[in-house]
Image: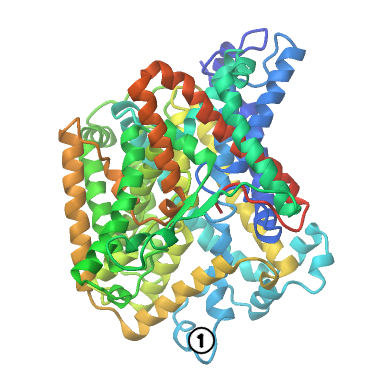
Amino acid sequence: MTEKKKDQHRTTTAGKPDGKSIRMRAVVIGFILSMAICAVTPFNNTYRQATPLGGGHFPLAPFFVLICLTVLVAAARKIFEGRTVLTGKELLVSWTLMVLVSGIAYTGLARTFFINLTAPYHFATIENRWAEVFHPILPKPLYPQSPEAVKMLYNGLDGGSQMGWADVVRQIPWHAWLQPLFFWGGFILVCYFIMLCIINILGRQALYNERMNFPLLHVPQMIEGALDENTLWRFFSNPFMLAGLGIPVFLHTLNGLHFYFPDVPQVPTLILAGPYFPAHGLFSGFYKLKIYIYPAFIGFAFLTSKQISFSFWFFFLLEGLMFGFLEILGYDIPAAALGVTFGPTLSRPEETQMIGAYAVFFLFLLWLARHHFTDVLRQSFGLRKEGLSESDWLSNRFSFWGFVLGSLLLSGWLHYFGVPFFLSILVLGAFFLFTLVAMRVICQGGMAYFTLTAAPLDGFLAFSGSRVFTGAGILITAVVQKVLFLDLRESLMPSLLHTRKITYEMNGRRTIVWGVMITLVAGVVVSFIAMLALCYKFGIRQLEVDWATRTTVAVYENIYNLIESGAQPRGWVIAFSAIGAAVMLILVTCYHRFYWWPLHPIGYLTAYSSAMWILWASFFIGWLFNSLCMRYGGVALFKKLRFFFIGLIIGDFLMGGIWAVIGFFCDASYQVLPT
């Protein structure tokens, strides 16, 4: 039976599809809305400085649109009885497509991309000697070779702010950008293809063998499940839901009005707890402690398992105590002991524990999936027949060989531009290792907002120094890391695993897979065009891109230091990495062997993440309510009370969406969620 006939067979004459069918309309709607998000996000986030439409791994715009579509579909179902415009599962597919590309349009790729490609030229001065050191080794195909094009990117086109968007796009000096975009676009899309293959291979292990929990997916799945069961009104009118919904609605209505009209009172959502702790001594690590109140993140923490939510805040507080404990022991280790680093938030030598911890946890994941990987290898080499179900995206054989071929292509790409071939394989392995571990933290821990502490390159430099790299090699490796593997708060891979979970029991795999791939390709293209058009219309100088500029320039400054002075292995970094590896080994062993063990290893991985400085209080509150609920009311009370915390999530994002729309048309925007 052909795919078309199967779709016809699954759909009744009344127009009601069966529970697992995904029609093309769901993918088309998701694609159109995804492209709209990609086109609008740079202008909204960078020029308007409004509430970010993307951001994190539960982005605002896709969820806000999902709620609106759900209400419209439910209303259409009432008006046109017997017709199902879209099912709940189809709306989830549209939502996941929007989630996939929402990060690409901003921090996941486009936010720093063009600054990366122009910083060595625009910020070169006689004092920093960038022209002398960088320009001879910059790979020419990867960088625009027109000084005028670079100058206009930062200053804008003459009269660009008065031009229409179509005119700006036509005036962009495409001759300077086509070659860099071709080479970088190829690299990025091959990376995305490899991620797709990895997720397809790991999907069965995570979803079927380990039965991994996905806290960030509970709310969308429950909403669309209620739509399919025709209980949407009952879902939203639940008393616990209304109580939870009312808190963020009241909070952000009042605080939003205060933002625009200061005479209106406000409710503080930030408590400065640092002044209550001494600047020196055991508790000196909490001298800058802050308590942020985010109702949505309290809701996510409640839906996360108690073991994980407890581990997040426990290890965060333990990390603060460790800082004071080292001070008491007399270990005042200067930041200079770190040497040259690329970690986005790395500031103290003890934070390099995460290098060893990431490596050991990755090996633990490999060990857990050893039987699954053995089966995949047998299927890939034709030693075992593979049963491909309708819900599988790709065959394991195709995914395995796609991963191998894609990795060889990326290694060849890096080698062509100056990285030794064997080293390029190791570097790519480190990049994907960190990304896979971060994906586990995000998807299993319900971390909608997550940042790395140390970067993959920090591990290489700590143990081998810079002697293994050539000048061009360290430059291209660091830039690639910055482009795709460093700013993981909007990384693609966790969103791909979420998409795999959403579509796990759905039929129509070809429709879904092709929809995902086409959406990713188009998302990259539209995001690049939108960001270029924005920069050439107003000029980067006129845009609020301080973070993107500062972090990108810092990367090139570090590259310059490595090329000029080199770097030797760092004893303190190696020591703390070894400590991190030992601690993680103990954690994973106890977690796997003792059912009563209270700590989850991924909590340790987030101890030094800057995200935990914002979210630790939310996880503490969510864990506390979850624990009290299960202790005194059991599962029955949990099923009732969870609607209250789901209301917190929905209310926070609804108000975020409303204020985002208002902020789009104003000069300033009230921020509901972390930026």
Report which quarter residue 353 is drawn in.
bottom left
Report which quarter residue 205 is drawn in.
top left
Residue at image coords 28%, 63% = 323
Residue 107: x and y in percent read 54, 56
Residue 105, compared with residue 301, is above or below; it is: below
Horizontal side of residue 346 vs 45, given as left or right: left
Q: How many numbered discs sit on the rendered protein?
A: 1
Residue 463 visible somewhere in the drawing: no
Q: Quadrant of the C terminus?
A: bottom right
Residue at image coords 36%, 85% = 564
Give the residue at mark 1: 131
Residue type at mark 1: give it.
Answer: Ala
Report which quarter residue 220 is drawn in.
top right
Q: Nearer the viewer, residue 106 or 619?
A: 619
What colouring style does the render use? Answer: rainbow
Q: Nearer the viewer, residue 332 or 503?
A: 332
Residue at image coords 28%, 65% = 281
Residue 159: x and y in percent read 82, 71
Horizontal side of residue 307 vs 673, given as left or right: left
Task: State the SS at label 1.
Answer: helix
Residue 340: x and y in percent read 34, 75
Residue 571 visible somewhere in the drawing: yes
Residue 271, compared with residue 219, is above or below; it is: below
Mark 1, other Cα within 10 Å: few <14 / some 14–19 / many ≥20: some
Residue 623, compared with residue 420, is above or below; it is: above
Residue 65, compared with residue 254, is above or below; it is: above
Residue 51: x and y in percent read 65, 50
